[in-house]
Image: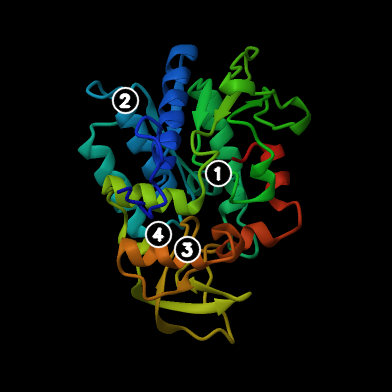
Amino acid sequence: MTTTVAHSDATDSPYALSHLDALESEAVHIFREVAGEFERPVVLFSGGKDSIVMLHLALKAFAPAAVPFALLHVDTGHNFPEVLEFRDRTVAEHSLRLHVASVQDYIDDGRLRERPDGTRNPLQTVPLTDAIRELRFDAVFGGGRRDEEKARAKERVFSLRDEFSQWDPRRQRPELWSLYNGRHAPGEHVRVFPLSNWTELDVWQYIAREDIALPQIYFAHEREVFKRSGMWLTAGEWGGPKDGEQSENRLVRYRTVGDMSCTGAVDSDATTLDAVIAEIAASRLTERGATRADDKMSEAAMEDRKREGYF
């Protein structure tokens, strides 16, 4: 008698990779390809779920040896404290090297100017590109996924950036049969996206399968928030709430984390991995579309920032 297994990660053939195994295998291959092809790669690590999964994959790719890459975080100064605490704890746990590029330092010395709306996410580009140039990184891993946003859907796994860290969609290279072209001229570098073909649901199902620890901000919790532009934002010194905006305590969770001034929470009672997965499976909005104000500044907001050097 044949038993049918009703599970998203099941396969008909005993020799075929499951969906999550195939995604994991592809990502591990990308990490090893970069290690063999580039001299000074770095992994962007913020303590957010995508960068946590990316680091978990890197640890798997090179175990039992140490990860042969440093980590880089662009700290806006308005990051969620619990996420920064998780970042630092993870770095210490795995004895990793972390470089931090601080937006606040650039504001303090006049290289950047605070925006009137208090949002610092768009200010990350200059510290990021300066760190890449000064530390001579030639490959930079990012946790971007094609399902997040239409500009990211255009990008290849290996994305060439010019000497000014700018992205030109017309210079995208074909990646037939998963053959990646990392050739670059002096001063150029390549942005690498091991999670390109993953979805938000894939990420959460993989987190559940691998039992990966996350900051508690991703699960439902009581939080002081206020509504602005249809999103629940965390109250703080960055500039909220303003006159006419009322703070209240709500049961919320975050689908993505970034600068507090532009990252919204969603109403949720999902306190477990299974509940979060069920919630995402039923959602019809991407995480950035639902909770990131910086992507709503214009129709081409993300693509404009990518052309300037943003991820």
Q: Quadrant of residue 83?
A: bottom left
> Dividing the picture into quarters, in which one does residue 248 lie?
bottom left
Is residue 97 in view from this perspective?
no
Tell me the CA gap for discs 3 and 1: 16 Å
Q: Nearer the viewer, mark 3 or mark 2?
A: 3
Q: Which mark is residue 67?
A: 2
Residue depth check, mark 3 versus mark 4: number of the one nearer the observer: 3
Q: Secondary structure at mark 1?
A: loop
Question: Residue 187, how many percent across, how many down?
Answer: 62, 17
Q: CA distance from mark 2 to mark 4?
A: 26 Å
Tag in front: 1 or 4: 1
**Local crowd size for mark 4, using a 10 Å CA cut-off: few (<14), some (14–19), many (≥20):** some
The three-letter amino acid code for the residue at tag 3 is: Ile
Decide which of 26, 149 is in the foreground and name it: 26
* Mark earlier in primary sequence (2, 4): 2
Is 40 placed above or below 269 here?
above
Q: Amino acid at mark 1?
A: Arg
Disc 2 residue type (three-letter): Val
Q: Marks 4 and 1: in contact by CB < 8 Å?
A: no
Mark toward the viewer: 2 or 1:
1
Image quadrant where residue 144 sits: top right
The Cα atoms of the two marked residues, 3 and 2, are separated by 31 Å
Whichever of callouts 3 and 4 sits on the residue coming sooner in the sequence is 4
Q: Which residue is mark 3?
A: 280
Q: Do labels 2 and 4 touch, CB within 8 Å? A: no
